[in-house]
């Protein structure tokens, strides 16, 4: 693991992105800054996540805007096709059918493909993931608005907000999030889906609003760029050997959380994908979360051992 990972997990490093944020907070504090301004909420309110396209497409179909739908899908594929995560009309239609109830305007469905991806790694005696049905709020007649609402109150924002607050507070810093001004939130929920996309490009309204404010290179950049970390390599080679040591401990095996043979199978598969350059999605996110959970549980176990 990279330096500081064991400490960061105690501050909520559910992904490598949040480890990066933790390190950023530390560096900013050491440089003398007392506050951070973040963009959390910007992607949710402006339809900036890749998965938001499918809810936008569903809105277009529900409104009978077939020509606009076909053009947006074509341009989405033009700008965002990927050797592993392919884009095109068939992919768009399949995703819409999976996440949107076309018989009920605006009603979003749980993404069972994403939820169940690693279901075989979880010991069903610990938690029956197959029977889990997430709460889905659908207060609007727009799929995209309901997806935004879900992100804001149940999924992406609560966990990210928790991480940002804890990690900035760990260094005595204030954390400001301008996109969560209630006036802006209320306004953005009144903006229709059709104004948030234009010819396959997301965050269209925000891009127009920032004309002359942001550098053009930033304002017009189409590809979404995150705080990516080479976590796929952290769990390969020497990192794989360290992970095998962790999985092989008695404490890990006796927790009853994971189906260990399936975890080991995924680790072998991850190694092949990374080192053979296979055109497939690897499992770095799964292993990052597995390591963080185990390190946190060991910390909790240590607290228990120290109690009188």
Image (tube, rainbow, N blue to C red):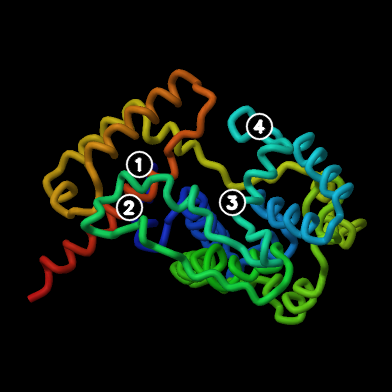
Quick check: 231 left or right of 195?
left
Percent coordinates x, y for residue 121 in the rendering: 30, 45
Taking depth in this image into account, of 302 and 273 the one nearest to the observer is 273
Asked whether the beta carbons under mark 4 and mark 1 sit within 8 Å of each other, the answer is no
Residue reaching furthest bottom?
Answer: 183
Residue at screen point 48% across, 53% down: 112
Secondary structure beneath dot 4 equals loop
* Front label number (3 vs 4): 3
Sequence-wise, the earlier of marks 1 and 3 is 1
Query: In the image, which disc is placed on residue 1?
Result: 1
Sequence-wise, the earlier of marks 1 and 2 is 1
Quarter of the figure with residue 236: top left
Secondary structure beneath dot 2 equals helix
Q: CA distance from mark 4 to mark 1?
A: 29 Å
Percent coordinates x, y for residue 98 in the rendering: 59, 51
Q: CA distance from mark 3 to mark 4?
A: 20 Å
Q: Residues within 10 Å of mark 1 (few under 14, many from 20)?
A: few
Q: CA distance from mark 1 to mark 2?
A: 8 Å
Residue reaching furthest front?
Answer: 103
* Front label number (2 vs 3): 3
Residue at image mark 4 = 82
Quick check: 27 left or right of 190?
left
Q: CA distance from mark 2 to mark 3?
A: 37 Å
Residue at image mark 3 = 98
Percent coordinates x, y for residue 109 in the rendering: 57, 61
* Front label number (4 vs 1): 4
Sequence-wise, the earlier of marks 2 and 4 is 2
Residue at image mark 2 = 6
């Amino acid at each position: 693991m990279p330096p500081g990972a064991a400490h960061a997990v105690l501050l909520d490093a559910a992904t490598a992105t949040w480890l990066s944020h933790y390190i950023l907070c530390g560096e900013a504090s050491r440089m003398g800054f007392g506050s951070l301004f973040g963009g959390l909420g910007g992607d949710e309110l402006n339809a900036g996540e890749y998965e938001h396209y499918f809810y936008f497409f569903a809105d277009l179909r529900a409104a009978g805007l077939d020509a606009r739908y076909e053009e947006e899908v074509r341009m989405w594929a033009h700008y965002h096709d990927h050797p592993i995560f392919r884009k095109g009309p068939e992919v768009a239609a399949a995703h819409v059918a999976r996440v949107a109830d076309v018989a009920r305007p605006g009603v979003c469905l749980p993404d069972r493909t994403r939820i169940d991806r690693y279901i075989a790694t979880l010991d069903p005696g610990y938690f029956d993931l197959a029977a889990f049905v997430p709460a889905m709020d659908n207060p609007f007649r727009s799929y995209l608005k309901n997806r935004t609402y879900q992100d804001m109150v149940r999924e992406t924002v609560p966990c990210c907000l928790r991480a940002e607050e804890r990690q900035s507070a760990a260094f005595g810093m204030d954390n400001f999030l301008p996109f969560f001004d209630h006036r802006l939130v209320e306004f953005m929920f009144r903006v229709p889906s059709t104004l948030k996309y234009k010819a396959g490009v997301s965050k269209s309204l925000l891009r127009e609003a920032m004309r002359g404010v942001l550098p053009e290179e930033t304002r017009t950049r189409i590809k979404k760029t995150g705080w990516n970390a080479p976590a796929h390599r952290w769990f390969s080679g020497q990192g794989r050997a360290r992970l095998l040591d962790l999985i092989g401990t008695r404490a890990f095996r006796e927790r009853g959380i994971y189906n260990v043979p399936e975890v080991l199978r995924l680790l072998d598969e991850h190694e092949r994908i990374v080192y053979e350059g296979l055109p497939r999605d690897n499992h770095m996110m799964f292993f990052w979360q597995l390591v963080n959970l185990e390190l946190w549980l060991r910390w909790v176990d240590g607290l228990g051992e120290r109690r009188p």
